[in-house]
Structures are given as structure tokens and as C-alpha cells.
Amino acid sequence: MNCPICGAVLNEGAKFCGNCGNKLEAVQQPVQPAVAETPAAPIAPAAPVEQPSIFDQPVQQPVQPAMAETPAAPIAPAAPVEQPSIFDQPVQPVQNAFVQQGQIQQPADNTFVQPQPMAGGGYGGNNYIQNNYTQDTMKQPEVKKKGKTGLIIFLVVLAVLIVALGVTLFIFRGSLKNIWARLTKSPDEYLKYVITENLEESLDSMEDVQKEAMDILSKMDDVNMQGNLRVEIDDEILDKLEDASAAILPANRYGSSYDTDYYDYYDDYYDTDMYDKYDSYDEYYQAEHGSSKSSGGNGMNLSAYGDIGLNADYDRKGNVLGLSVGVQVKGGSDVIGAEGVFDGDNYTVYGRIPQLNKNYLMVDLKDIVDKNNLKTVDEVLAATADLSAMAMDPKAQRSMYLRYTEALLKPIDKVKASKVKLSVNGSKMSCRAYEFTLDDKLYQDMLLSVIDEIKNDRDLEKYFEDYFDTFDFANVRNKPDWDSFLDSLDEAEDKIQDMDFDEEFTCTFYITNAGKITGFAMTGEDEKDPHFSLAWYINGTKLDVELTSDFTDKNDKTEFMDIKGGGSVKSGKFSGEFELDLSLLDDKVEFSVEDLEILDKKNPGGTFRIGLEQFMAMAGDAADEIPDSIKKADLVISASGTIRDRSLSIGLENGSKNVVKFTMDSKISESQGMAVPSAKESVQIDEKTGETELIKYLKDSDLEKVVSGLETLGLPDSYADQIRQITSMLDYYN
């Protein structure tokens, strides 16, 4: 029999293998075939030391290191061969020796076989372990797994770095671009680059505004435009205005106010021979009834102006246009107004005063205008349907701004760059100063460079021609053309080349490390030369601004204006306090801005506020005549809204009370259509029946309602009475 582990020949009935020491009773059924299936090379008999045939035996299952199950009292080894380090090595499976020799491998038995200690010491699985440790047959899946994990980690880290780099480039793309430009460009080139880049940002919002304006202008045949002006005046100011009105409405012959009996003597004038005696009824009245004439004019009653409004509405849908205006008191309905409709398709005009008569007066232009003039009406309607031709295309205009800026900056050279600490309203910031000298030569070169750009500007040439093509020059001797415009530029060039001045100015642009312009200064060589500087510093949510300017007049008196201040920025809106130091004033003046839009350049808005009491010293003795409500008031200017829905207010506020305030609102939207009055609600006026129809129309009107509305608006009673006499005059017409 053979040992199922090492293959050694054993005696019948042996309980232990004399070669490997395995206990035969504990051994599982041999997996490998019998001796008849041994390899061609015979296995040598068991020897105490050398076992070359052991390496050719099949291995069934990787064996865990035997140290894991070493008895508490280890048995001393019986063999001289010691390999203590082998138990510390990973046990790897090896290929079956039969497979290596081309034999068919038997199915492996996955039953775990624990090597047993030999009687003389050591472990019976020693040669098995040695086979697994053989370098040329050993596999190392753990090593390969570790290498694959490292590759995955490397790829993940690489992906994270790529994403991080992309995010960084996106967030700091402007800064990185600016740093690269500063490192690779000369000071001359870098200054021009920064100015152009900053202009590009401003043009973004400007182009958006222009596009929206162009859209409105291109649809003027489908538009509704509403406007409202509201006036609020307190009682003290109203009293002053009423007193002033009495002084400017004197009684005189042609602008006088008469008593109510002025027209009562018409019968006497015409029934007698008085019209032969006097040249006019007015002359007759003054001669015969002059004692009844009013002695003077009356002041206006302006009590209604405490809250009064003027509204206007323009609407156009195709060739039908409508316009209405009205005056309101305290937000109510119109006390007086006017409405008009023009039907361009049928050449008819309608108009009325709603308070006078609900019907319209209608004029048919075909009856009073020749055909040639009607063609002119069509041309006007066509031209006003799309007014965008009068404005340059936003993209072309943007291109012009950039090209002219580039042309203006092109001659600038010898720019000096330096690092500086710029002080703005007490705050200091690190930036770079780019400085150059502006003399007469550079000034001439800059102007000539711009003129040369204009001469080669095809966009401007096209706009020039298209713009003047929209006008009718039939009655004009010469239509402006591009060639004549170029001739005028040639004359301008000659004058510029003859210019010269002795002064030189140092111009300085202050630029942050991020490439943003944060200030500009211009200073002459002499102390008496003009000086100007403007700088601003944004640090987080804090914004500081400083402006200084001065010059010396011919009497060697220095005139100056300095503005310093700052505040905070929240949600893109700036609010701050400022101080104005003006040479005309003895003391400094304070003013403020509230919610000034600094990010939304498309829809600028905000509130400006300054106290008037600070300026009273300039008024001198005239300040005594100024009401206290005005002296102690603040001038407040506020704007808000969009280009289509805008609000602007200007007024004087004393505490929470409006001394006087003007509020203007405007709104632009699509037309909902204007109805053309029907024949039933209109009275046609023509050359034949015009006078008769007009008198009839006035007789059917409510003149008293109109007069009452005018009185509400402050018309003096004497003037109102004169209008009322028209009713008496109408009785003389049959």
C-alpha cells in the first residue's frame, strides 16, 4: 500500500507513514489514482531526507498554516530539516503534477485535510507546503488584487482632480485669464486688455437693454403705452401758489374777467343801431356798461392739487391708433379729458371730450385731403409701424463700442506699472497702478485713430444710409450722404493736427489683482492744473467710494469738490452715507443712497436723498421767503422697475410727509385693440354741413359739466362765467 499523502510504500497494517508521519486512520480516502497511474518517472523509495518525487504529487486543496492548530505542547521535530519561515508565508495552490505531464486531472476533493504531526516531530504536510511555496508554480491572487485596487484608487483620484480643476477653471476663469495676461503681456498691452475686458462686461447688460428697446420699436403697430403723472402738494405750498396766481391773472381788455352780464346786452347791440356806432360788441359793452366790468382778476383755487393726476394712453393695432388723456383729482375719475381715434384704413379721424358729449366728432379725410396726401398718410403709417430702423442693431453697436475703444487706446505707449496701496475713504487696498503721460501728441494720435476707424466703419456707413433713407428729402436740396460725411472728417483731421497745448497730464488706472478697474486719476504737472480722481473699493459686503477734483481759476482761486463715503452691499443693492465738500459751501453736506442697484445694470434703480437745510446759507436773504416745510425737507429722487414697467419720483419730504412730489409711471405692453366709433356714436363734420352740425353738437353737449370740471382744477369763477356765456351765444344760431 502507499501513503495517500506522500505516496511512500507502506507495510500492511501500518498506522503511521514512516516518510511523512501522517496517521493513516485520520486520512481521507485518497483522491489520486493508485500506483498504476503514477507518472513515468518512478517514485524513489522513502528516504529520511531527500524526497524528490514529492513535488510531483497532486495537491487537492490549499492548506492553512499549521500553526493555527499547533498543540499547546509542541512535539520536537524528528527530522533535521527545519523551515520555520515557511509557516509565515501565504499558502498558494499549485497545479496538479499530472496536469503538468499532460494527464487528465481528476476532480478535486474540496475536503480540507489537516496535516498531522509526525511522531518524531514536525508536521506531516511539510512537503505539501513546500510544493505550495515553489516559486515557478506559485500563484498570488492577493498581490494581483492589491495591484488592481491601486489602479482603481489612482483613476478615482485622477477623476476628482479633473473635476476639481474644471470647477476651479469655471469659478476662477476670469482670474486665471487675467493672471496669464498680466504675465505674458507688456504694461501697454495689459492696460488695453483690462480696459477692453471691463468694457465687455458693461456692454453685456447694455446689449440686453438695446435688444429689448429694439423689440419694442419694431412692434410699434402692436403696442399699448400708458403713462401717469401724479402730483402731491401740501396746503402751505398751495397757499403760496394761489397768491402767486392772483398776481399773474390781472384784469385787462383781452385777458380780463367780466361779470356774468357781459353777454346779456347782445340783443340791445343788434336790435338797435349800436353796431353802426361801435366797431365791436366789446367796444359797445365797455362804453355803455363799463361800470359792470369786473375790477380785477381772481386767483386760482388750487385745493384740488393736493392730490391730482394726469394720465395718458396710446394704443395702436395695425393702422388704428387711439390716444386719450385725462385729469384726475384724488384718484377719482377724470374731471376733464379728451379722446381721439384715427382709422388709417379708412382715413377717418374721431375726437371728443367725454364730459362734454358722449358722441364723437368725425372727419373723413377723403373729403378734404387729395389723393397724394393720402399716400403720404400711408407712408407715415408704414414708417411708424417699425421704428427699429432709427436705431442701430445691438450687435453692431456693441462692435462699434469695442472697435472705437481699441482705436482710442491704440496710440497709448510707455505705460509704467507698479504696485501701490490705494487709499479709499480710509480703507487701503493693494493694487497695481498703470501710468502714462497724456500730451498734445498723444491726444492728437488718439483722435486721429478714432477718425480713421470711423472712415472704415462699414456698420456705421450702412446705418448712416439706412437712417436717412427713412426720411423724405423730396423738398430738401441735398440729401446727406456718406461721402459728404467723410469730407467733413477730413476737415476735422486737419484741425486736430494743428492743435497743440503745453500742459501734460499723468493718467493712472488702478487695477486689482483680479483685473478689475478700481480707480482712475488725472493730474497736471503744475499744482494749478486740474486734478481729478475716482476710486472705489469693494471688500466683502463693504463698499467705499472717494472722488476728488479741483482746479484753479484765472483769479488763482481754487475750486474743488470732494465726495467720500461708503456703505454695505446686500443682495446686489448698495446703501450708504456720503459727505460732500464743496468750495461753494461753508460746511460739508451729507447725502445718502438707498437700495442702489449695482448688479442689475439692465434695470438700474435706487433712491438718492439729500437735506436742503444744508444749502440755505447759499440762498442768503432769499431763504427768509422759503417756507419752513421746504427748508427742512429732503430732496428725494427714486427710480425702480424695468424698461417696460418703470417708475420715477422726484419730491421733497419733510419727515414722513410729502411737501411736494411728482411720480411718473410708464408701462409698455401689447395692444388689445382700439374700437373705431360707429356711425351711431359719431357726428360727421364736412365742408358743407360742418358749421351746422358742429353747432348742433355743441347745443346737445353738457357745457356746464366741462366748466364744473375746470373749476375743480382751480379756474377762477370770472373765467368760468365767460365760458358759460357760450350757451347764451348758441341760442342765436337756428
Image (spheres, rainbow, N blue to C red):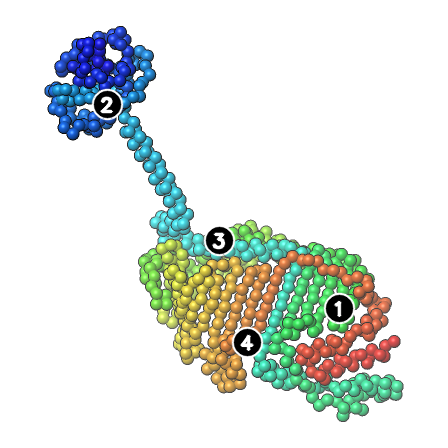
Q: Which of the two marks, 2 or 3, is nearer to us in this view?
A: 2
Residue 12 visible within the image: yes
| In this rendering, position of residue 435 left or right of residue 137 | right
Q: Nearer the viewer, residue 733 or 433?
A: 733
Kindly identify which numbered label has been placed on residue 402: 3
Q: Position of residue 393 (x, y in %)?
A: 57, 53
The residue beneath circle 1 is 352
Q: Indicate the position of residue 294 as horizontal and vertical percent values.
A: 73, 89
User: Nearer the viewer's eye, disc 3 or disc 4?
Assistant: 4
CA–CA distance in space, label 2 to label 3 = 88 Å
| Mark sitting earlier along the chain (1/4) | 1
Q: Find the residue positioned furthest to the bottom.
A: 291
Q: Give the residue at mark 4.
A: 658
Residue sitting at 61 percent across and 77 percent down?
A: 306
Residues tagged 2 and 1 counted as in contact (Cβ below 8 A) = no
Point out the tag, 4 or 2, that comes first from the N-terminus: 2
Which three-letter amino acid code belongs to the residue tagged 2? Gln
Residue under pointer 2:
114
Q: CA distance from mark 1 to mark 4?
A: 35 Å
Q: CA distance from mark 3 to mark 4?
A: 45 Å
